[in-house]
Amino acid sequence: MFSRTAFTITVNPKIPPRLKRLEELANNLWYSWDRATRTLFSRLDPNLWEAVGHNPKAFLKRVDESALLKATEDRVFLATYNSILSTYDSYHDASSQDYAGHLGPQDQVAYFCFEFGFHESLPIYSGGLGILAGDHCKAASDLHLPFVAIGLLYRQGYFSQTIDSLGNQQVTYTISDFDDLPVTPVLHEDGSSVQIEVALPQRTLVAKVWQAKIGHVTLYLLDTDLPENSPQDRYITHNLYGGDRTMRIEQEIILGIGGVRVLQALGIKPTVWHINEGHAAFMILERIHNLVEQGLDFATALETVAVNTVFTTHTAVPAGHDHFSTEMMQTYFSSFYQKLNITREEFLSLGHVSDSPDFNMTALAIHGSRTHNGVSKIHGDVSANICRDLWPQIEPEENPISYITNGVHVPTFLAQEWSDLFDRYLGHEWRNKMCDLDYWSGINAIPDHLFWSVRQSLKSQMFHGIRSRITDQNTRNHGSEAHLDRLLKFVDP
């Protein structure tokens, strides 16, 4: 009787030397706003491109090697490939322009956020906060700013949503294979993985550091799914916005405290620290701790940290601001009182808001920063009112919460039809003149009928997309053709 053993064999296509830099293009999220690069991959196998969710790295692992070999003999494909590489190299080799304002050559911005939305091929985001953070990184790359970002690497970044026949939302979670994501481990010179440690109650947590490239910008991501950790701790970075309050505070400790330690391990010394929403505010405590260890008293250390810390608040309702009970803070941070040379009450006051006994992360972020902003004029006013108790001596409209209106990364979101029209009438340099009002007066030279034609064409595409989704939904839910016809009458192009 012979025993049988099952083996898994993974066969990856060999990329021809002529197309070797496809791997480089697949590992830099520059493709997330360069349509030509994404189109290049899709031309090799359109069906596979759709099946892998427009993920270049996953695509290259699965594409038929014969398609790659055929592409090396396709003059049109090679010409496009060379043109894209030329654009890619020019973008990355371009010297830094004078966009940095008061930032000097020795400056470095560190941008902390709970989620980053660049492209569906890196599903570590949920909604608007992540999209904004992704756009900040892209814009920083375009402007050649000295900028690094810190986040968490989730196995389940967000869910896919469908609507059933009763109108209920149905969610599907997909566990990411990191080998398919445009991320790579950060390594020491000896080839070992960079890891950091964070103290949690009765244990020490180990986190591995990964990196993603976004043009010129690097995003460092922390991952606790390591054999050194307990099964429970391995799950901490598994899901974005998942779990209970314990899971949330541990994620925020890893992001804030662990993120500071990542930068230290890599020798990065930021001169500006940006907290994008209160999730990362524990970084303030770690930075104060480092300064106290160097001999500063707590008050001086707090002011030293606050003076170069920027805090952006996004949530327009009080319930959206994270807070933890004093008992939970005692469990996780009792050792910090002694490290900071302060009392328990002084520590808890950093997160105190008068109408709640809990430790509020927005309060910590405000106490530990000197620049605070909402994300629109109205939101700035709303945030000033929500946080009014932190400045009880003055009226909300006079407190220091200002605003910076959210923008979008134009190359990512502007339709190709508009880009082509602007290229024709404004020249290609419009991409570098977003804030030049005089330059944009040239838009008046675009004939009205062409402007209207593009608008109507895009509107028609939108309606066709809606009809397609409704049809798919009706088919999935086994709806009748008569019902589908009634629905589609409301979305005629």
Image: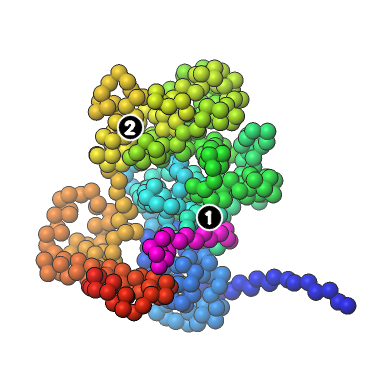
Frontmost residue, 394 versus 163: 163
Above or below: residue 51 compared with residue 367: below
Residue to which mark 1 is pinned = 156
Image x and y of residue 157, in percent: 50, 54
Inspect this view and state whether residue 227 appears. yes
Q: Is residue 165 magenta?
A: yes
Image x and y of residue 403, in percent: 28, 37
Q: Which quadrant of the view contains residue 368?
A: top left
Frontmost residue, 411 versus 222: 222
Rendered image: mark on residue 386: 2
Rendered image: mark on residue 369: none
Element under disc 2: helix
Q: Is residue 312 magenta?
A: no
Frontmost residue, 50 versus 94: 50
Inspect this view and state whether residue 307 appears. no
Above or below: residue 194 compared with residue 469: above
Rendered-image quadrant of the N terminus? bottom right
Q: Which residue type carries mark 1?
A: Gln
Image: magenta residue range:
162-179
